[in-house]
Every structure is written in structure tokens, then in C-alpha cells.
Image (spheres, rainbow, N blue to C red):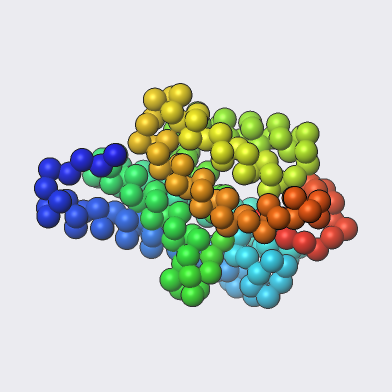
Amino acid sequence: MLHPISWSLALPYYTAALAFGYLLGSIPFGLVITQLAGTQDIRTIGSGNIGATNVLRTGRKELAAATLIGDALKGTIAVLATYHFFGQDLAILAGLGAFVGHLFPVWLGFKGGKGVATYIGILLAFAWPAALAYCAIWLAVAAVARYSSLSGLLAATCTPVVLWLLDDRQEAQLFVVLTVLLWITHRANVMRLIKGTEPMIGNSSTSAPRT
């Protein structure tokens, strides 16, 4: 964990790193991109979410792809920029801030996305092999179960273990927190999985939100 020599000296830096990450993470790319493209407010369609999956419901795949990239990169940039100038401890806080910012953006009344893209972006910045493992697990589960939400949640659950095995101990602890938050934001998906009403990948016969 963090080991400041003096909390009175370190606290402003920790606060600044957390705030920097939060402000980057709170940029609502899904909403900004769709509004610039002249589509309807994505908060009024589908799940009302600002993430790439809901943007896809506008019928504009390129906007969904841009949203996915933007939401991932804000996590990656928050971590890499902070790490470059201030080191690992503050990068950990910047990553946490970016994730929380995406989930609870101040600009949208603290109603943000569910965090998968930003989660992957932060993971990519800290340990790209773990990000590859996440994608491999996602693909394997999706191939068998055909549930996008289940694939993402199981891949995330494995992520702290992968990081620990890679000897990235601080990062593993961070991703325990992020994974818990990810499960919380996907609680509606979990309930639908339990009830058997969660849409499967490639099934457009139901309007229930996937992410």
C-alpha cells in the first residue's frame, strides 16, 4: 500500500492525483460524441447509460467504437501521465480516481457508465499482459456462455489474481476494489442472469440492456 514519509506533505499530492484521475474519468465521451454527431440524447434510449453499448443502440457503430476507445483511454492516460511524473503510488490513486469518475461523473449528476472500458484502459496502463488475459478470459466465457456481462464480470474477477501472479501486488489490490465496484454497477445484469432474462450475444429479440 501507500507509504508516505509525512502525511502532511504527501496528502496534497495524493489528493491531486485522485482529483486528476477523477476529472479525466468523468469526461462523458458517449454523451459528447453522440451530441456532436447530432444523434438523440443516449440517456433517453435503451438503458440510459452513457457507455459504448448504449451508444450502439443509436445504430451508429462508429460512434460506439469511438466511445469505447475514449472511455478506455481516459483511464490509460490518467495512469500513465501520473506514473511518468510522480511514480507508482500516485498512479494507483489516479487510476482509482478515473474509474470512480467514470461511474459517478460530477457533470451528469453522478450518473455515469458501468466502467468496463475504463477498467480495461487502467489495466492496460499498469500491466498489458493482464489486459490480454482479461480479453482472453472474456472471449473464452463468451464463446461458451454467450453472455457479454457474465464474460466481463468473470474476467474482472480473475484480474486481481492474474496481477498477483505477475507480482504486481499494489495493482492487484487496486483491482480488487475496482472489481467490486464493477460487480455493483452490473447488479441489474447479475439479477437478469439469475432469472435467465439477460440477453445473449447476438440476440436482438429483447430490449433489456446488456451493460
Rendering coords of residue 94 (x, y %) = 35, 51
Percent coordinates x, y for residue 115 in the rendering: 54, 54
**Horizontal and vertical percent for residue 126?**
41, 37
Tell me: 23 left or right of 136. left
Q: To which quarter of the image does residue 39 belong?
A: bottom right
For residue 3, side relative to residue 188 (left or right): left
Name the one closer to the observer, 12 or 129. Answer: 12
User: Split into 4 quadrants, where in the image is the C terminus?
Assistant: bottom right
What residue is at 48 percent from the left and 70 percent from the top?
110
Q: Quadrant of residue 24?
A: bottom left
Residues 194 and 189: in front is 194
> Vertical placement of 93 versus 166: above or below?
below
Residue at horizontal 40 percent and vertical 42 percent from the top: 174
Q: Residue at x 19, y 55 (%)?
A: 11
Query: In the displayed structure, does residue 86 sit left or right of residue 155?
Result: left
The quadrant of the rendering that contains the N terminus is: top left
Please say if 193 is above or below 126: below
- The answer to whether residue 197 is visible is yes
Q: Image point 63% across, 43% down: which residue? A: 152
